[in-house]
Structure formats: structure tokens, C-alpha cells
Image (spheres, grey):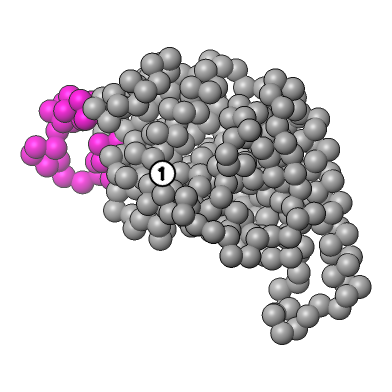
Amino acid sequence: MGLLPTVVGVDGSSASLDAVRWAVLDAELHNSDLTVVSSVPLPGGFTGIQIPPEPATAQWRGETRRILDEALTAAGRVMTGARTIGVDACLSDRPAVSTLLALSATSRMIVIGTSGLGGTDRRTLGSISFALSTHAHCPVTIVRAWPDDDRVQAADAVVVGVDGTMASDAAVALAFEEAAVRRAPLTAVHAWSDADLSIGIPVHGLEWPLNKPPTEDALTRILDEYSHQYPSVSVRRVVVRDRPVHALLDHAQGAQLLVVGSHGRGGFSGMMLGSASRSVLGRANCPVVIVPSSGRSVARENSHVASAPSSR
């Protein structure tokens, strides 16, 4: 089995079951064990001093176990049997954010749905989605609408955003790996400018016909290293003048996966989710993988979870 497990967070919502279905297929592709995690939903009025009554705690734990059982049933229903993976369940008494962030230090991937676990919709990111995408030590996948009978086609591309930053480099590395295991083509999208250059007065030296060739050359240099590592992956290079979010969403239509870094040009590494990543998370129709910068990825290799969630 894989050295690191794939972890999926569930809360009983239909969105979290979508995440389970996607996580099973992804774990099979990577030969990774799967851990299904749910947290006991303590009401917001309780603190560490105010301990909930035992009957209430027992009821919440019982409901959480039911949620885990439902998720395990959903996982078993979509297993292809192509590879045998271990599936485990974990019930945590800690909040969902702290539980999943702790597990991210020793996981291959954290997977959650687009709503539930704190909630989000097509316009905004929920608190848990934002916290994980910003602070997790491993890649985080946000899954939208993954029905029981859905099977992606190998012809559906993996799309990655490339902006030349350290976070982008980590995203490119993972995108090549995902394209290779899925036997899918890769579309690499680079925007020369984050700003909308159609607005304002034209500036001498910023003409696109002059800057497009060297920008294409720069993108090729970034991708060449990985192309040599993954010679079976067919790569399509896309360079646009501006508006990276628009370009990413356009090419993600019909894609099986969109991969972006946790922060972009001008972002603060490890402290915030870049505006482009945040925008595509709220609007993309395919699963989106947020990849942390290499600094956070390396840190997890030496991390130890101080207080591991309780096992089911």
C-alpha cells in the first residue's frame, strides 16, 4: 500500500458522500489506503470548561458513527476492485478543522466536499475549506457533484495553473503525477499578467505580440523537467495575456481535475489562499486540488501529530 493514506472528511451531507466516492477512486489510482473521518459536532456554546452532559455526548457520538457507516457503505459501493485498498474509519472528538489539519501532516491527500463541514457554495468558500486550503501540509481536494455512476474518461484532461512561483512548481509536479496515473493529457495554463490589461492606457513595451514568444519559452522551460520524468504524459501549453482565473475555468470545462497552488504571485507563503485559487474553488465544475508550497510539504515529513484523533 501507499506510505501515506488518503483522508476524506464526512459530516452526513450529500456533498461529503460525493467526496467519499471521488476519494475511493483516487486512492485506488495511487494504491493508497483510505481513512474516512468524522468529528462529533459539539455545539458552539461549549468550551473546554463547559463539558456537555454525557447523554448529549453519547447521542452526538452515535450520530457520528452512523455518518461513518453511511460513508463506508458509499465507499464500498464504488470500489472497482482493480486494486485492493484498506479502508478505515476514524471518529474524532476534536473540531473538524483541527482534526483534518493534524492528519494532513501524515496524509497523501485530504478530500472534502464543496459544502458541508462548515459549508460553502459556488460563490464563497466555507470556513473549513478555506482553513484546509490555506494551512494543510498536504494537497487538499475540494469535490463537487460526484455521482455514484460517474467515471471519468481518460481523454478528459488534468489542468494545472502555472505562474512560476514555488507553490506553482509544487502544483505542476503533482499535476504531472495525476495525469500519469490517470493516463490523461495535461493542460498547463499560464497567464502573463494577473491584471486585466484591457483596462487602462496602453503602455509601451507591454504589447502582447512582443511578450508572448518569451512567455511561451518560459513556460516550456518550467514544464520540460517534468516532461522528462513523465514521458507518457501529453502536454498542451496554453499562454494567455491576462485574467488567469478566466483562463483556468475555461480550460477546466470538461476536465477531470484542476490543480492550483495554495498562493500565487504576490501571496504570502503558508499564510493565505491566493485570490486565483480561491476564485476557482468557488466556481470550477470539476474537483480542484490545492497544493501547498514545498515548504509546507517538506515540513509534514518531519511532523508528528501531537494528539491524534480517536479511532473508531
Q: Which residue is drawn at 88% across and 75% down?
A: 54
Relative vertical location of residue 95 with respect to residue 146 in this rendering, above or below:
below
Q: Residue furthest right?
A: 55
70 vs 187, nearest the viewer: 70
269 vs 15, nearest the viewer: 269
Relative vertical location of residue 62 with respect to residue 262 in this rendering, above or below:
below
Q: Where is residue 296 in the image (x, y as percent from the top left)?
A: 42, 53
Mark 1 lies on a secondary structure that is: strand
Q: Position of residue 302 (x, y in %)?
A: 46, 54
Q: Residue at x 80, y 33 (%)?
A: 76
Question: In this rendering, would 159 be left or right of 181?
Answer: left
Q: Where is residue 63 in the image (x, y as percent from the top left)?
A: 86, 58
Q: Residue furthest left?
A: 204
Residue 245 visible somewhere in the drawing: no
Residue 95 on the magenta span: no
Relative vertical location of residue 138 with respect to residue 248 in this rendering, above or below:
below
The quadrant in which residue 238 appears is top left
Q: Which residue is drawn at 69% across and 80% down?
A: 48
Amino acid type at image mark 1: Gly
Relative vertical location of residue 92 with respect to residue 234 in this rendering, above or below:
below
Q: Give the range drawn in magenta.
A: 191-219
Question: In this rendering, would 79 be left or right of 246?
Answer: right
Image quadrant in which the C terminus is located: bottom right
243 vs 45, nearest the viewer: 45
Q: How crowded is mark 1: few (under 14 residues within 10 Å), some or many (20 or more)?
A: many
Q: Position of residue 244 (x, y in %)?
A: 36, 38
Q: Name the residue under label 1.
A: 261
Question: In this rendering, would 113 be left or right of 204?
Answer: right
